[in-house]
Image: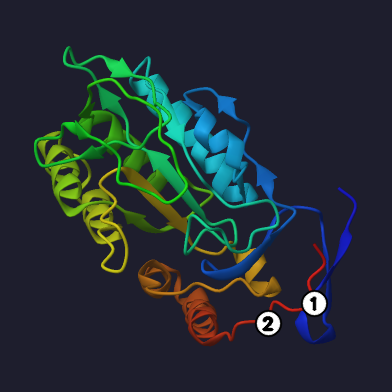
Amino acid sequence: MAPSLLLLGCGRFLFTDGTSVSVGSFNDGALRHGRALPVKGEGYLIPELWRTRDARYGTDELTRAIARAARRVRREYPGAVLGVADLSRKGGGGSEHHRSHENGRDADLIFYAVDERDKPVAPADAMPRYGIDLRARPPAPSKDVVYGPFSPRRFDVKRNWSLVRALLQDPEIEVQYLFIHEALRARLLDWARAIDEDPALVDRASAIMHQPGDSLPHDDHLHVRVFCAADDRAFGCVDRGPVRWWKKRYKYLPPSRQEEAAEAVAQLLWTPMIPLRGFIP
């Protein structure tokens, strides 16, 4: 792919190869050359409500990982269809529907559900909420959003854990957070332990799945946030919050690379935000 020129703040220019560039942070950022997730693929679809918003842009890494995860779940559980809601707008930036999703590293995934006969049901133009009994309730009211009807359904523990596992094991991304209600998180972890999942994977899922304290409880969807891709840090992509897996990774590298990795972690923790003024759309 032919290289292109990207203008950074303070008169800085960098050449890119035309792939996606995530800039800034999840709540103060931009997305350049973002990849549009197709509205339908193997094992997933974007319901009409979210198609009309056209907030289906993300980094190359995130969009490919969503498609891979949905495909993997469908092959493990034939008939499973993942509902994909908002990623980022084309070009990134703020949205009236979110306080994040600004630089292509966030995605909202509608929970898998089953009917009363334990059969998979398709995602609807709605985000049902799920309580401790795992039964669907009406969506939380949202300004200027009219949700469509949905059939009776239950939170599908098996398929939702399969989705979490697929995302955490994807070699192209490193998940920073999976925002989810605490009660649903507990059910997923209980299931993982019951089927004798790798304890290291369960521990990692336990640390990364998190009910946010400054927003809605995420009992209606799984919010995925991935770390900046290594290449995007050169363009000003900034990870806010814990970088736990980066800080630990260097300990397990060969001695010749530990110092290099530790220095990279230090730079990651202290890299200042590059101003977003002066970007080319």
Q: Nearer the viewer, residue 150 or 17?
A: 150
Residue 46 visible in the shown view = no
The three-letter code of the residue at mark 2 reads Pro
Left or right: residue 68 compared with residue 247: right
What kind of element bears circle 1?
Answer: loop
Q: Nearer the viewer, residue 169 or 275?
A: 275
What kind of element bears circle 2?
Answer: loop
Percent of width and height locating residue 76? 35, 22
Residue at the image position 41 percent from the left and 23 percent from the top: 81
Q: What label does residue 42 carry, if any?
A: none
Percent of width and height locating residue 152? 22, 21
Looking at the rendered image, the quarter that the C terminus falls into is bottom right
**In whole angstroms, how far apart are the C-alphas of marks 2 and 1?**
8 Å
Q: Are marks 2 and 1 in contact (CB under 8 Å)?
A: yes
Residue 280 quadrant: bottom right
The residue that mark 2 highlights is 275
Residue 142 visible in the shown view = yes
The residue that mark 1 highlights is 278
Percent of width and height locating residue 121? 32, 19
Q: Is residue 135 above or below residue 19?
A: above
Residue at the image position 40 percent from the left and 28 percent from the top: 148
**How does the figure colour the protein chain or chains?**
rainbow
Q: Nearer the viewer, residue 9 or 251?
A: 9
